[in-house]
Image (cartoon, coloured by chain):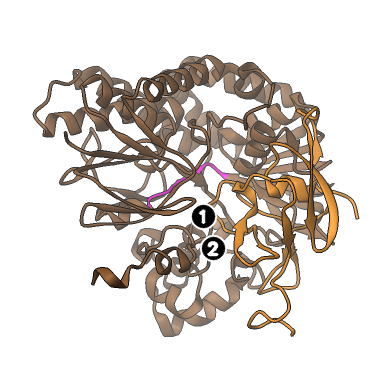
Amino acid sequence: MTGRVLRLAETGRAALRFRFDGEELTGLAGDTVLTAILAARSTLRAAEFGPERRAGFCLMGACQDCWLWQEDGPRLRACSTPLREGMRLRSAAAAGWPGEEA
Amino acid sequence: MTRVLIVGAGPAGMRAAETLAEAGLHPVVVDEAARAGGQIYRRPPEGFTRPAEKLYGSEAAKARRLHALFDRLVAEGRVTHLPERSVLALSGGVAQVLGAVREEIAFDRLILATGATDRLAPVPGWESAGVYTLGAAQIALKAQGVALGRRIVLAGSGPLLTLLATQLRAAGAEVAAVLDTAPMRAQIAAGAAMARARPQTTLRGLRLRAALGRRYHAGVTLERIETADGPVAMHWRDARGRARRTACDMVGLGWHLRADTHLADLAGARFDWSEPFRQWLPRCDALGRAGDGFYVAGDGQRLLGADGAEEAGRAAAIACLQDLGLPHPAPAPVLRRLARMERFAHALARAFPWPAEAVRALPDATVVCRCENISAGLLRETLPLSGAEANRAKSLSRVGMGRCQGRYCQLAGAEIVAASAGRSVAEAGRLRAQPPARPAPIGAWLATGDPGAE
């Protein structure tokens, strides 16, 4: 799987490790969660109401397209949340969440 | 001391804060970003190294000046800056604010400088991953140093289309085509009025446009975005009606801006349909008074752009100081500059019009509401039951009820509602805003409840 975004500048930053859907990925200090994931993956999540996938839309916190789950529960908006070392993120709710396969 | 709350730390909010601080007040500025600047002068995170000239181009000096001014006011303790917080609701002189924790901020006077979002018209396929707003592509470049794709098509209309294409190319991105739905005829007709109001700004735009060469096409019709895992190509017709296909893996869309008036609505503003801007804007006087102790400024009031936002921020602060009976700068020069900005903005809107006819004629299968994938056809099916009124159409079709709360679909939805009844879009009405202005976890309220206090 290749990334969607292309880094054009500011590539000399420190690496940060994080987990997305159980896989170890690496982003850069100063990345948003959205940038870090889309540097390695083509999408963030499945759409709830259609067959397509989603990868954010407005990047200014207004459209709410980029909500992701964290392994420990609370959701976050990927476009406006800075990446932190050791984050454990999911594209969908954990099994057992109401509406998800147990 | 009078408690003045300013929402938004873009050019309008920063200038309002400065004007109040100069008069001896101590305003509180709440903003969603980590660093003040707004969208136009958005600052990258700490540790990024590109200079302002790279980030803001010809506007670098203005950006530097505003950032330095605001940082100084905060450092001197004359302005309180509360970053990384969203105002969710306003009532009874209290703002419900959510950041790392929930806060209630009481105020005597309120200045809303909430800015704007991109104004979007649906294009078949726009719900796909890899389709973004023009503003998103600019934020990604400015604040993260990334392009949102390897081969980019930008489509829509307005000044950002040309500016963004130029910025992306200068940064090394591949821009395959710049597709402007504005006919060249309209651009030329309104261009003279733009040049009269702001000659240098107009000339700068023309130079950027010329440098795009054959990538730029005016008067296009956007037919559909061909998608697989993401965009594969944009299908469009040129001004002479010839079918074209441009391969790409990212599409940026936007038709100028839409004032973000959500909080103004919650604060009790009344609204009027603005024919020049083709959208609903809060009713206010020339300085921005929208109610008792309540002012609006910047693109959330009228879409005058960054320079106009600075003036509108000053104007709102002057109105606030007048109402408090405090000494204030003379309003006349500010109002003169605002009038010139408005002449320019009106001409700009004529040059790069909203594609009303294309939206009214969208195929039934086109998604109108991206949040919940509601198609133009489904919206049209509900209209015989709901009637041609935006809020009732929203209740039945859910267009405007998703998580973006209508920010990206309501103007297109209103065109479809109006078309069904043969009415003007203004007659379709305006979606009433509901709190919270951003999605918020209920836990933020439950966790702070103190049953012992009852």
Q: Which residue range is magenta in the image?
A: B255-261
Q: Which chain is brown?
A: B
Residue under the image location 65 percent in, 52 percent down? A78
Q: Is residue B85 visible?
A: yes
Q: Is residue B260 magenta?
A: yes
Residue type at mark 2: give it: Arg
Residue under the image location 51 percent in, 70 percent down? B399
| Image position, residue B153 (x, y; %) | 75, 43
| Residue B356 - label | 1
Residue under the image location 29 percent in, 26 percent down? B314
Q: Which chain is orange?
A: A
Left or right of A24 in this view: B26: left
- Is residue B209 depicted above or below A16 in this figure? above
Choose top left, top right, bottom left or bottom right for residue B427.
bottom left
| Image position, residue B451 (x, y; %) | 31, 73
Using the rendered image, report if marks 2 and 1 lie on a common chain. Answer: yes
Cα distance between the residues tagged 2 and 1:
6 Å
- Is residue B23 depicted above or below B152 in this figure? above
Choose top left, top right, bottom left or bottom right for residue B425.
bottom left
The image quadrant where one finds the C terminus of chain A is bottom right
Do the numbered discs 2 and 1 sit on residues whose CB atoms are within 8 Å? yes
Q: Which residue is mark 2?
A: B360
The image quadrant where one finds the N terminus of chain A is bottom right
- Is residue B158 depicted above or below B201 in this figure? below
Chain ID for label 2?
B
Q: How many marks?
A: 2
Residue type at mark 1: give it: Ala
- Is residue A45 depicted above or below B112 in this figure? below
Q: Is residue B434 magenta?
A: no
